[in-house]
Image: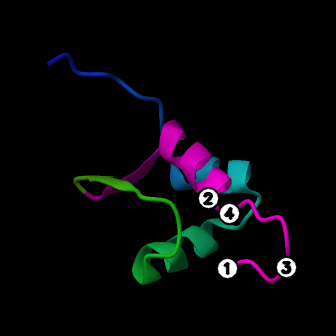
Amino acid sequence: MALQIETLLTPIQAASILQVKPNTLTKWRVTGEGPAFIRIGRAVRYSAREIARFIESQTRRSTSEK
């Protein structure tokens, strides 16, 4: 099995892509609401692929959708 290297984003970079404040990502990590994240030691990182998945999962066609 070959290791596939992904682009890892800092919380600031991920927040910029999602157009939210970095503190929002911090809150989402606590509540489990946001995109999946990676912890390497004390550093938090987000895979670019996971950010794209999260954006896709938030797409709605109606305000009544959950």
Location of the N terminus (image quadrant):
top left
Residue 51 relative to residue 61: left or right? left
Q: Does the CB distance between marks 2 and 4 fall below 8 Å?
A: yes
In the figure, is residue 31 to the left or right of 56?
Answer: left
Provide the secondary structure element on which disc 1 rests: loop
Using the numbered discs, state the Cα–Cα distance from disc 2 to disc 3 in whole angstroms.
14 Å
Farthest residue in the left direction?
1
Instruction: Determine whether 45 is above or below 34 in the image.
Output: above
Residue 63 numbered tag = 3
Circle 3 crowding by C-alpha within 10 Å: few under 14, some 14–19, many from 20: few
In this view, the mark in front (1 or 4): 1
Is residue 52 depicted above or below 55 in this figure?
above
In the structure shown, which secondary structural element does the residue marked by tag 3 occupy? loop
Sequence order check, earlier mark of 1 and 2:
2
| Quadrant where the C terminus is found in the figure | bottom right
Checking the image for residue 32, the label placed there is none
Between disc 3 and disc 4, whose residue precedes? 4
Q: Is residue 55 magenta?
A: yes
- Mark number, residue 57: 2
Question: Label 2, label 4: how many angstroms apart (C-alpha)?
Answer: 4 Å
Residue 23, position in %: x, y? 60, 74
To which residue does mark 1 refer?
66
Mark 4: amino acid: Gln
Image height of 42 relative to 33, above or below: above
Q: Amino acid at mark 2?
A: Ser
Amino acid under disc 3:
Thr
Q: Residue at x 85, y 79 (%)?
A: 63
The span shown in magenta is 42-66
Q: Secondary structure at mark 2?
A: helix
Q: Position of residue 44 (x, y in %)?
A: 39, 55
The number of discs equals: 4
